[in-house]
Image (spheres, helix red, strand yellow):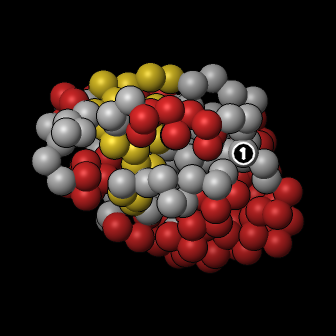
Amino acid sequence: MMDRAVIFDVDGTLIDSVDQHAWAWHEAFAQFKHRVGFRVIRAQIGKGGDQLLPVFLSEKLVRKEGKGIEAACSAIFRVRYLRRLRPFPQVRTLFLKLRKHGWKVAVASSAKKEELDFYTRLCRVDRLLDAETSSDDVQRSKPYHDIFNVARRKLQGIAPDRCIVIGDSPYDTMAAKKAGMHSVGFLCG
């Protein structure tokens, strides 16, 4: 019986995409005449737009321009960067080994469902998942723990302390801790 699970973040953990997301945000901010440096944006990658925008814009500007900036970022990322992405080596092999040793495997991402589906196919793990959660399933992104809680509920019957979250950002660790889960940090980039 599988009573333990590994929940993977995707961007920066399974897919080498942190810089590409940071560049897309940088370009989107520039379209709206906001000068935000690449390095400071990169440090915020791992959060969804709902948590990233308030770091750089006032509450008033988030209300006024936030949806437009997010839409621009998504379009830039999709057109300029998405098809260039590559998974880190051996992702599929890792998932197969975890399943062989009795672990349930899930992914939980701040990406939209359509983007997450692309990623899981790119990594060739789409048929190896016991659960997946995208930003479409929650109202708040990391560092809130909503995304990991939804993934765990979809795993049906796994207690929080029987879950290990593997991610590349401090926001993954913060969210895992709030959800009562263990975490492992993966350094990338």
Kindly tell me whether residue 42 is visible in this rendering.
no
Is 64 left or right of 29, judged from the image as shown?
left
Kindly tell me whether residue 160 is visible in this rendering.
yes
**Which residue lies under the disc numbered 1?**
87
**Quadrant where the image shows the N terminus:** top left
- On the image, the x and y values in percent for residue 74 come to 67, 69
Q: Is residue 30 above or below residue 168?
A: below
Q: Nearer the viewer, residue 133 or 140?
A: 133
Residue placed at 36% from the left, 54% from the top? 130
* Amino acid type at image mark 1: Pro
Q: Nearer the viewer, residue 30 or 74?
A: 74
**Quadrant where the image shows the C terminus:** top right
Is 37 left or right of 186, judged from the image as shown?
right
Residue placed at 82% from the left, 63% from the top? 83
- On the image, the x and y values in percent for residue 65 come to 58, 73
- On the image, the x and y values in percent for residue 29 come to 72, 61
Residue placed at 48% from the left, 53% from the top? 128
- On the image, the x and y values in percent for residue 185 come to 50, 23
Q: Is residue 26 above or below residue 46?
A: below
Is 154 left or right of 186, judged from the image as shown?
left
> Callout 1: 10 Å neighbours few (<14), some, many (20+)?
many
Label count reads 1
